[in-house]
Amino acid sequence: MRKIIFICMVAATLFACKSASSTASTSTEATTLSTKLDRPTQVAIKGNWVLTNVTYPGSDYIKVNSFDLADSKCFIGSSWNFISNNNKGTMTLNSASCTAFTSPIVWSINNQGLFVLKIVNPGTKSKNVKEGYLLKVAGLTDTSFQLIDNINVGGQVKDVTYQFQRAN
């Protein structure tokens, strides 16, 4: 009887638990993080948002290629949808002076307060996307929040802040 209980406990552990870590890469390094999620923060972010501003030191002189997609300024005015119950959504770049772009995304906020973002390319299943971006979540209110990325400028790490406002 003990053997059966032990086997059932091992089987339940193997099939009921997710992997203890997942990998997401930022623009500078791959980082292993816990897959435990910060559900209250995810629920607070769910919905439709507009990225209203991108700021970083030296923005008058330095161009930042955000998420390996486009110049950071092309993200101003972009629309983002975050669905918290399945960690999916969409992002749409719609700046008149930039190339239009729409993509599904997979996202979560881990228990360390890091926003994990994966951009899903056409024809790719989200479960097959192995690389992504880690950003800090800051200033979360009912109507706004920031995502903060790190970039390397001349050997120094600088913050790039993406300001979001809740869409009506």
Image (cartoon, rainbow, N blue to C red):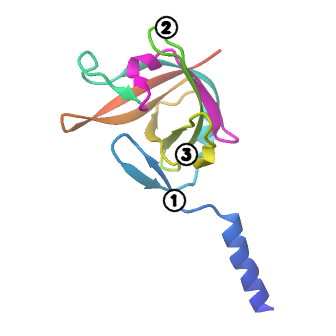
Residue wearing tag 3: 129
38 and 94: which is toward the camera = 94
For the residues labelled 3 and 2, the Cα–Cα distance comes to 29 Å
Q: Position of residue 66 (x, y in %)?
A: 40, 28
75 and 124: which is toward the camera = 124
Instruction: Write the residue at 45% across / 13% down.
Output: 98
How many residues crowd mark 3 within 10 Å: few (<14), some (14–19), many (20+)? Answer: some
Q: Earlier in the sequence, mark 2 or mark 1?
A: 1
How many residues crowd mark 1 within 10 Å: few (<14), some (14–19), many (20+)? Answer: few
Residue placed farthest to the top in the image?
Answer: 96
Q: Dot 2: what SS?
A: loop
Residue wearing tag 1: 21
Q: Position of residue 62 (x, y in %)?
A: 26, 22
Residue type, numbered disc 3 = Val
Q: Dot 1: what SS?
A: loop
Residue type, numbered disc 2 = Ala
Whether residue 97 is visible to the viewer of this picture, yes or no, is yes
Is 74 a magenta residue? yes
Q: Position of residue 10 (x, y in %)?
A: 69, 78
